[in-house]
Structure formats: structure tokens, C-alpha cells
Image: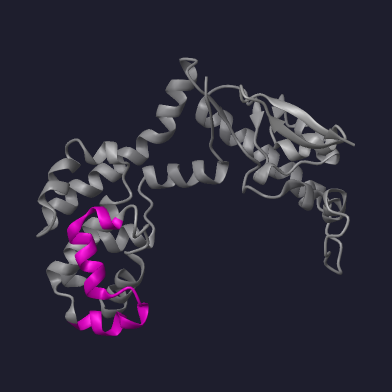
Amino acid sequence: QVTFNLTPSLIRQLNDLATGAKDIYWVLGEKPVSELTDDEKRFILERFFDVNWTNILARYPRYQELLDKRGTDETNISAAMTSFTDQDFFDLQVWFNLSWFDPDFLAEEPLLSLVEKGEGFDENDKDVLFAQILKVVQEVIPYHKELQDQGVIEVTTTPYAHPILPLIYDNQLALVGNPRAEMPEREFSYPQDAERHLALSVEMYEENFGRSVRGLWPGEGSVAQDIVPLVVDARYTFMQTGEPVLAKSLGIEAFTRNSQGFVQEADAL
């Protein structure tokens, strides 16, 4: 009834995180403030405000207060290094990670108590927070699998690293879609790489979802006639792209939508 697309590179990252891998944001979010180096504090001040300031950060008074204290101009980082207290860093570690949760998670325990507390966080609060982060990460793929097994959703996937597959196959294919494209001096054509991206995507999909692959969403919806045999050989049964590609394939200048929302032809060439 609805389709979700999970790229193999995302699946790999989720599996790595679910089994204990941590990126620099996770590591510095968990690290006790008393053990942070100056370089780590600077990183936190620079990067732990990387959320939408209007629609997300501003919803939380303490998070907004911390941004105001640091300043919206990153040239103020040096001053913030001395003006931020240990408690400020504690609260910033927590709010940066809390703010990335869907509001539904924030409206129920164990995160609701942290939202309501708002400030003055400690290591116990961070333990609760990161335990919940790990729990949610670990549930992403199994939950999609469960819903697909129930017939509620379908999960499609993408060539392994979300490449523009036709350009890997042969970058001259860019001229089919745009004859006036500015091309590099050196031609690039590695069909074997395109095949490998597809093979890896099938392998990862079937390993994680326990069924044969069906649908392919090419990176950026990029398709070309030349890659169709590769997709078929990889055992995909369909692939998706956008209306402009369909229009050009049918020799139609454009598509419009009628009052019921159905696509119809317009301005046939």
C-alpha cells in the first residue's frame, strides 16, 4: 500500500550502528564533559547546532538559549569556548541528539521525561538517551521487514552506493538526456562497476529482508536503455523513475495532472 526505499549503503550503516559502531557525533555526545578536549569542545560548538533552527531548534527553549549564547555566527566559537560552562556542554550534548528524534518518540517515555526536564542534564540522562538511540536504530530494518512480510508495505532498494548508474556504465549517456551537456575531456565507461553495484544491492537486500528482490529505485531516478539488461540480469523485476523520463520516452513534451490527480498527456510533439 506504500513503498519505502532503503539504499544498501544506508542498510550497511544501520547494521554497523546496531552492532556497536559509533561515528564522531555519537562518541562526543556520550563522552563525559569533564573528559572533552578543547578540540572536541570546539567540534561540539560547531556541529551540535546542525539542525533546522526555525522548525526544530526553536521549539526547545534551552536549545535556543544555547544557540543564542554561542551566536549564529560561527566566528564566535572562540568566545563560546570560554563562556560555555560544563552544564552548557551537557545540555548541548543531550539536545542535539534529542532533536533528531521524531516528535512521536519525544512524546512518550523514556524521552518525554528528558524533554520535560529541559536542562540540567547529567550522565544518567545521557545513558537513557543513547540507550534509546541504539534501540531505535536496531529496530529500523526489522520493522520494515515485519511490515513487508505482513503485506502492508513494499521495500525497494538502490544500486549499492546510490550512484548515477548510467554514467558509471558510460558517461557519454549524459548526452542522450541532455545533448548540450558540458562533458569531461576523458570518457568514463566501467560497466563492470555498474554490475557490481547492482549485485551488491541484491545481496544486501535478500540478506536483510529474507526474500527475492523486486523493485529498484535508481539513484536520482537515473535510467538509460543501456542499463536495462544489467538490471534484468541482477533479477530485478521493475525499476522506477520520474515523469519527465516517461514523457521523453513516449515522445511527449510534458505531463499534466487532471482534477482527480491522474497523470495525462499534454502537448504531444
Which residue occupies the extreme top position in the image? 150
Q: Main secondary structure of the magenta part?
A: helix
User: Residue drawn 44% across and 33% down?
Assistant: 141
Rendered position, 11 above or below 240: below
User: Residue drawn 21% across and 74% down?
Assistant: 69
Rendered position, 212 above or below 241: above
Determine if residue 236 is in view.
no
Q: Image quadrant of residue 211?
A: top right
Question: Percent from the top left, x then y, of residue 45?
Answer: 30, 72
Question: Percent from the top left, x then y, of residue 10?
Answer: 51, 45
Observer-nearest of 184 and 55: 55
| Magenta residues (range) | 57-82
Determine if residue 248 is in view.
yes
In the image, taking residue 186 as reference, residue 134 lies left or right, namely left
Question: Percent from the top left, x then y, of residue 161?
Answer: 62, 48
Q: Quadrant of the C terminus?
A: top right
In the image, taking residue 53 as reference, residue 160 lies left or right, namely right
Q: Image quadrant of residue 14?
A: top left
User: Residue drawn 24% across and 56% down?
Assistant: 95
Magenta-drawn stretch contains 6: no
Magenta-drawn stretch contains 62: yes
User: Residue drawn 65% across and 36% down?
Assistant: 217
Question: Percent from the top left, x then y, of residue 131?
Answer: 23, 44
In the image, taking residue 147 as reference, residue 186 lies left or right, namely right
